[in-house]
Image (cartoon, rainbow, N blue to C red):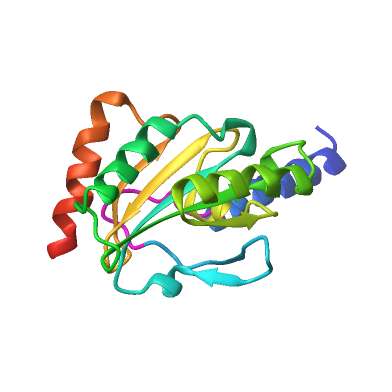
Amino acid sequence: MSRKLMVVLSLMAVVLCWSSMVQAESLMAGMKASDWSFKDADGNAFSMESWAGKILLINYVDPDESDLNEHFTDAMKKAKDQGLLKEETYKGIGIVDCKATWKPDALIRTMAGKKAKKYNTTILFDYEAILRNAWGLEADTANAVLLDKNRVVRVIVRGKVPQSEVDSIVGMAIKIQDE
């Protein structure tokens, strides 16, 4: 093997080792979630601190898959409408993974506006997949993350929330309001 090839292979090995060390650890139940800051369609910045002291459901969604977890979001909305999830202790939001789609920003904002109105919530925009990369979320799908008041992950679902788990996740959100 030539010296030049050995140097190139050695450099590649170093880069691979370094990139695996700096890659973010995937967020899992029991871990504290790192904070973030994103803007809504009006340019207002929000972070987890914006809803300090509240249980936070974050639906992180590729716009191409915006209806994938609607069954789950509808169940959480129903619990809120019934007063089981209280305004003072719970907040559900959406964060759009804009980098995961070919759709133009104007169309994404229109789609998000309809969802925000339907669920009476805040929709934020992640144009560079910052949260997806930081939390190890899945691209090209929906992700649901339920955080307690201390920002510890109670539930994380990458992809479609199985119908069989919807009631237990809703029940957990209701239960942890009193913790």
26 falls in the magenta region: yes
Task: Give residue 138's position: percent from left, percent from top.
Answer: 52, 38
Residue 162, how many percent across, how many down?
Answer: 33, 26
Overall secondary structure of the magenta section:
loop
Q: Residue at x 62, y 71 (%)?
A: 44
The reply to whether residue 20 is visible in this rendering is: no
Q: Residue at x 78, y 48 (%)?
A: 106
**138 relative position to 176: left or right:** right
Q: Is residue 47 above or below residue 115?
A: below
Residue at screen point 61% across, 47% down:
112
Task: Specify the segment rendered in magenta.
Answer: 23-32
Tell me if I can see residue 66 in this picture.
yes
Side of 9 where 53 appears, left or right: left
Q: Is residue 50 magenta?
A: no
Q: Give the x, y percent position of residue 20.
A: 56, 49
Q: Residue at x 70, y 54 (%)?
A: 127
